[in-house]
Amino acid sequence: MRLSLGGDCMNRKEGFVISLLLIGVFLGSTPAIGLVSPNPTTTSTTQVTSVDTVIMNVAPGLAFQLGSQGPVSTGIAVSINEPTGSPVNLTAAFSFAPAKGFSSVNLVLLTIVYLGGTGGYIGFGVEINGRPSIPIQGTTIQNTALGTLSRNDLRVGANTINIGLLPASPSTTASTFVYELKMTIEYTFLA
């Protein structure tokens, strides 16, 4: 029995073409595995943002009475009565929950909205998380005080704030009403 040469020739031709294609794939082009990195790298960039945290807000704050009775306050009383009594401070808790990738706190500002008050005080003493008091200037004429706090005193998560009056001199009696405490926190994070 004689085999047909046509079938053998076709198989040889196909084998030759396939061999050329395989050689071309291995030598002439980059393998597909080289196109996709097995460990893709991600780059993080430093971002800066800020958040306003309202610690306390008493609204409407002031209501005026008819006649000569003056304003009636619904704020939180803060006073000093030295040396006969203890000071009355405002103490509150607040949280700081930064974005994912938090790196560091850059700046902490505190805004205090208050009614001028009575007596001789020169501002407010502010403690964050029991750290040493930082003075914020204010007078009995103004209604807003703004100050910079230590960025190292703030923690991620739960925090406390304690605010009292700073007497102008020893044996001073003074008082005021606080209506709003707002903290502006600027921080850096990786995104």
Image (cartoon, helix red, strand yellow):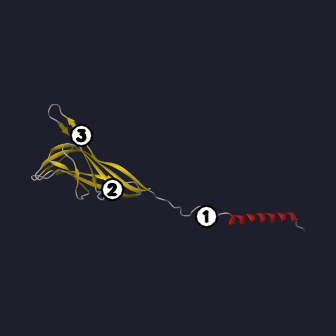
- The amino acid sitting under disc 1 is Gly
Residue drawn where x is 36% and y is 51% of the image: 50
Looking at the picture, does residue 123 appear above or below residue 41?
Answer: above
In terms of sequence position, does the residue under pointer 1 or pointer 2 come before the other?
1
For badge 2, the amino acid type reads Gly
As drawn, the residue found furthest toward the bottom would be 1
Q: Nearer the viewer, residue 190 or 167?
A: 167
Residue type, numbered disc 3: Gly
Q: Which residue in the structure is indicated by mark 1? A: 34
Q: Nearer the viewer, residue 15 or 116?
A: 116
Hey, which quadrant is residue 58 in on the image?
Answer: top left
Q: Which residue is mark 3?
A: 61
Q: Quadrant of the N terminus?
A: bottom right
Question: SS at mark 3?
Answer: loop
Q: CA distance from mark 3 to mark 2?
A: 29 Å
Who comes first in sequence, dot 3 or dot 1?
1
Is 186 situated left or right of 40 in this image? left
